[in-house]
Image (cartoon, rainbow, N blue to C red):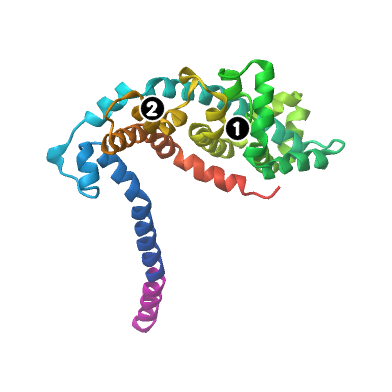
Amino acid sequence: MTTTSIPLRSLARKRARPAIISQVFLLLLTLVFLAPVVWALLSAFKPANEIIRNPLGFDPGTFTLHNFQQMFGDIPIGSGFLNTAIVLVFKGTITLFFAPLAGYAFAKYTFRLKNVFFGMVLVTLMLPTIVLIIPLLLEMKELGWVNTYQALILPGSVDAFAIFWMRQVISAVPDELLDAARVDGCSEFGIFWRVVLPVIRPGLAGLAVLTVMNIYNDFVWPVVITTADRMQTLQVVLSTLAQNISGNKIGADYATVTGELLAASSIALIPLLIIFIVLQKHFINGILAGSVKG
């Protein structure tokens, strides 16, 4: 008993060492990624001159909300949040409703030229965004949609990646479930709504997180299609913060602009952190569900 237990203990120690090393490595990697975020959050509460004079230090005695007060007075961050929220709700709803429908059709139905159509969808993934901007802008101008929510919401609502993601997830749903629902007299849309959607919830949640992050961080299209301040989304407001302050406020120096930028960026970061922390389990499950080969 004694002679056999010693090799087992040594074997257990050898197996534990790689696990400890990997955990330490992941911890260090996490600290590296979190360091800029923590620095930005702490610096937002420092006096503007202190940010420039001692960027890596933080004295709790100098804690101040002056950067936030100036920032709220200089830029329309409230309207930026509102516009982003409106676009997020409507565009996200369109994506999460129609992308699974398209993915369901490509995954579970057989029709003429299906592979050709799916290939055309995938080809759009290779088109750079910059190539589509001018045609889309001209189209929005002809429709009279410049500086409107329609222009911010409809283009790109159902993109190729979302369709591909849903197709991969739905391909893993057993055909026997669908056949059983048909035998019970369920309609085709009823099968999708009552059978498919409950099964693909992890994949749909993963797509929801990615969709929210993409819409929230979208900058190129909103900055092109919105010329009026009242229609600018949050990312456009943040990107033009330095220019707006320098143009509208006499004597705005680099330290002041930096403090207000950090304050605005800290506020903009909070919703994404909350969403990811709350939905991280679903996001990871969705990643795994989306990796299933169809």
Closest to the observer, 251 or 156: 251
User: In the rendered image, which quarter is residue 157 located in?
Assistant: top right
Q: Which residue lies furthest to the top in this view?
A: 144
The quadrant in which residue 251 appears is top left
Q: What is the three-letter code of the residue carrying label 2? A: Asn
Q: Give the percent coordinates (x, y) of residue 250.
A: 29, 26
Please say whether residue 190 is one of the residues in the magenta stretch: no
Q: What stretch is highlighted in magenta?
A: 1-16
- Does residue 247 appear to the left or right of 202 in the view shown? left
Q: Mark 1 points at which residue?
A: 198
Q: Relative to 108, does residue 194 appear above or below in the rendering?
A: above
- Look at the numbered disc 2 and give the secondary structure of its residue: helix
* Front one among 247 and 103: 247
Which residue is at a point 54% across and 39% down the rendered structure image?
206
> Would residue 196 be visible to someone looking at this image?
no
Q: How many marks do you count on the picture?
A: 2
Q: Position of residue 26 (x, y in %)?
A: 39, 58
Furthest residue toward right:
112
Residue under numbered circle 2: 244
Q: Earlier in the sequence, mark 1 or mark 2?
A: 1
Q: What element carries label 1?
A: helix
Instruction: Please tell me in which quadrant of the rendered image residue 169 appears.
Output: top right
* Residue at image coords 42%, 31%: 240
10 Å crowding of disc 1: few (<14), some (14-19), many (20+): few
